[in-house]
Image: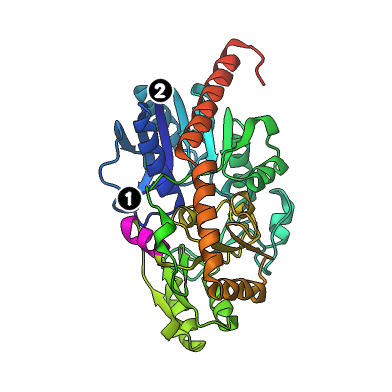
């Protein structure tokens, strides 16, 4: 099968979508499938320089919404795809509604919804003026709650304003795909709330590749907690984690693996809270260095301020025998088993999170038990083979639906 992957952005610091794309390309290659990549804008060097791609193509303009009547992105994308002749198109984060509509009319299309961008003006389904998760579909309430106010572009202090009309246009285009996937039931429910037919969107939890690591000999571990995530905004909760550190009775050390424009703010808060001697900033980490960081930590902590769509960091932690302490929000309960592989903490409850961290720090036996349980859980429930089976099933279903549309047959 020839699979055409479409990403809005490509390269630069490896975010979740970039890492997922690389894993999918490797997985499909190992399965004997052919993959091609089209992207709108390249932000920097690719996560991996030698991905087993049959070809890759830049299509400027695909990374944003349509720009007036002279916009020809849809026509250029359709012409490029026609020349590549894929069996199925697999989109990751397409933002150009006419281009997506054109693809769905001419090819079988599967969409992977990594987050809430097509159903939220703010991308996060979280209030602008208060720490409150949004329970509403895309619509007029987004304007009343200030969701149309976006953070300033790089180099500017003025906020950007999102268009509800354009967002609704993209959402309508997304509904035209032949099948859609989400990584958690929480995200799937949010899309169904926004009008997606339940039979056309399915949950396919993410996976982490087998790393061959046996964690049994990695205990006991030092009293180190690890935060892994972007520091481009507040939503991963690194600043809240400093409040947690102040509440911990045990002498816990924190390692922060991540970077971004918000890093300076976190460093400043560390100094203000007199925590600099207990917090280590490790910058962007990947590959073996990140694996070693997981294996040295007593726990990975996820204090997400938004409804985390899935939280792949948690799987990576458990694959390395590391318990996870996370807020009970979004898609995290999809993989974290309370009191078995870690702790689910009530959202925003820093006192409860500190108590769970102290509990682990004072009980190395429990760290070992939870770490080994997490390792087994990932290997049995979140394997590459099960993900490949689900993904190929989604591709075949989209192909069948596309041909049924073309021939006028009825297919659910």
Residue lying at 40% horizontally and 53% vertically, measured from the top left? 214
Based on the displayed image, in which of its 4 quarters is residue 261 positioned? bottom left
Residue, disc 2: 1
Towards the viewer: 155 or 235: 235
Q: Nearer the viewer, residue 412 or 196?
A: 412
Question: What colouring method underlies this structural image?
Answer: rainbow
Q: Which segment is the magenta one?
A: 287-295
Q: Is residue 17 left or right of residue 306?
A: left
Residue 57's spot in the image, x, y percent?
A: 32, 36
Q: Is residue 72 visible?
A: no
Residue that carries the numbered disc 1 in the rendered image: 47
User: What residue sits 47% from the left and 83% below the top?
Assistant: 270
Q: Earlier in the sequence, mark 1 or mark 2?
A: 2
Quadrant holding the C terminus: top right
**What residue sits 66% from the left and 77% below the top?**
351
Is any atom of residue 174 visible in this view? yes
**Rendered position, 29 above or below 353:** above
Please identify the quarter of the rendering in which residue 363 is found. Answer: bottom right
Element at badge 1?
loop
**In which quadrant will I find the N terminus?**
top left
Check the image and report above or below for 306 versus 209.
below
**Mark 1 packing: few (<14 Cα in 10 Å), some, or many (20+)?**
some
């Amino acid at each position: 099968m020839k699979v055409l992957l479409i990403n809005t952005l490509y390269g630069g610091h490896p975010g979740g979508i970039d890492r997922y794309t690389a894993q999918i390309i490797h997985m499909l290659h190992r399965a004997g499938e052919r993959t091609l990549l089209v992207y709108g804008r390249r932000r920097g060097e690719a996560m991996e320089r030698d991905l087993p791609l049959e070809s890759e193509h830049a299509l400027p303009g695909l990374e944003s919404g349509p720009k007036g009547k002279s916009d020809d992105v849809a026509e250029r994308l359709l012409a490029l795809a026609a020349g590549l002749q894929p069996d199925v198109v697999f989109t990751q984060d397409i933002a150009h509604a006419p281009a997506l509509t054109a693809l769905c009319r001419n090819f079988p299309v599967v969409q992977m919804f990594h987050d809430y961008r097509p159903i939220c003006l703010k991308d996060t389904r979280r209030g602008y003026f208060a720490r409150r998760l949004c329970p509403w579909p895309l619509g007029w309430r987004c304007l009343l709650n200030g969701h149309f106010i976006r953070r300033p572009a790089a180099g500017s202090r003025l906020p950007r304003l999102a268009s509800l009309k354009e967002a609704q246009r993209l959402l309508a285009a997304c509904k035209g795909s032949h099948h859609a996937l989400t990584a958690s039931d929480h995200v799937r429910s949010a899309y169904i709330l926004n009008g997606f037919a339940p039979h056309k969107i399915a949950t396919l939890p993410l996976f982490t590749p087998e790393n061959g690591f046996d964690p049994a000999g990695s205990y006991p571990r030092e009293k180190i907690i690890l935060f892994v995530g972007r520091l481009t905004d507040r939503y991963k909760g690194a600043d809240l984690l400093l409040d947690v550190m102040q509440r911990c009775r045990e002498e816990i050390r924190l390692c922060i693996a991540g970077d971004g424009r918000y890093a300076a703010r976190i460093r400043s808060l560390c100094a203000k809270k007199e925590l600099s001697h207990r917090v280590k900033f490790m910058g962007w980490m990947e590959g073996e260095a990140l694996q070693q960081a997981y294996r040295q930590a007593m726990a990975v902590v996820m204090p997400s301020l938004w409804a985390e769509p899935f939280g792949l960091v948690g799987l990576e932690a458990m694959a390395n025998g590391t318990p996870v302490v996370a807020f009970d929000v979004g898609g995290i309960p999809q993989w974290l088993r309370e009191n078995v592989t870690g702790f689910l903490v009530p959202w925003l409850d820093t006192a409860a999170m500190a108590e769970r961290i102290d509990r682990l720090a004072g009980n190395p036996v429990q760290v070992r038990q939870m770490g080994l349980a997490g390792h087994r859980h990932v290997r049995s429930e979140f394997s590459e083979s099960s993900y490949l089976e689900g993904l190929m099933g989604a591709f075949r279903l989209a192909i069948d639906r596309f041909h049924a549309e073309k021939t006028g047959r009825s297919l659910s």
